[in-house]
Image (spheres, rainbow, N blue to C red):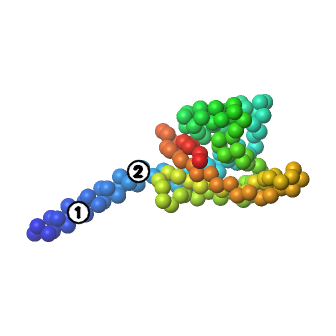
Amino acid sequence: MKFLKFLTLSSMILIGSSGCNGQTNVNDKQAISMLKKFYTAYSNVSLRIEDLHKVDSLQEKYCTPQLRKEAKEYLQDGHDLLTDDWGISKESLTSMKIIKEPTKENIYVVSYIVDSYPVAPDKPVKKQVNLYITVVKEVESYKIASVK
């Protein structure tokens, strides 16, 4: 009888704890969809002064307030935090892949290929870019919280 009570209690604890873990993970499909929409839209804007209102609008829709602040500071220093200074073009979108990082919660890897010019401006070299992105749920939408 004691064994049956122990087994029942253990089962209840396992079921209850697995339900809690599921709530801390963001919904993978929704997060991946949001990241794809963001980087697709981001590839259509430039970081020139005349387009900064478009960048601000995208960041407001897709990024947390803290990340927007950090990205703005980077941009003032001439850097693009959201692509780790690699940029993203329409051509890069054809190679873009977004996967869930299997070992960490709420982390997604956005990878794509860009043309890099390490030797000469007329000899591009293909460069694989991997961005590790933390996604969080805010109210009813998913937002980018960090990019590494």
Amino acid type of disc 1? Ser
Q: Amino acid at mark 2?
A: Gln
- CB atoms at circles 1 and 2 under 8 Å apart? no
Read off the residue under disc 1: 10
Q: Give the vertical position of 47 relative to 39 (above or below).
A: above
Within the image, what quadrant is residue 63 found in?
top right
* Image quarter in which the N terminus is found: bottom left
Name the quadrant containing residue 62. Answer: top right
The residue at 70%/38% (across/down) is 79
**19 with respect to 107 (left or right):** left
Count how many numbered circles sit on residues in the image.
Answer: 2
Q: Is residue 30 visible?
A: no
Name the spot of residue 8 as percent of width and height, x first: 20, 64
Q: Quadrant of residue 70?
A: top right
Depth order, front residue of 58/88: 88
Place of residue 115 in the rendered image (x, y in percent of width and height, measured from the top left): 79, 54
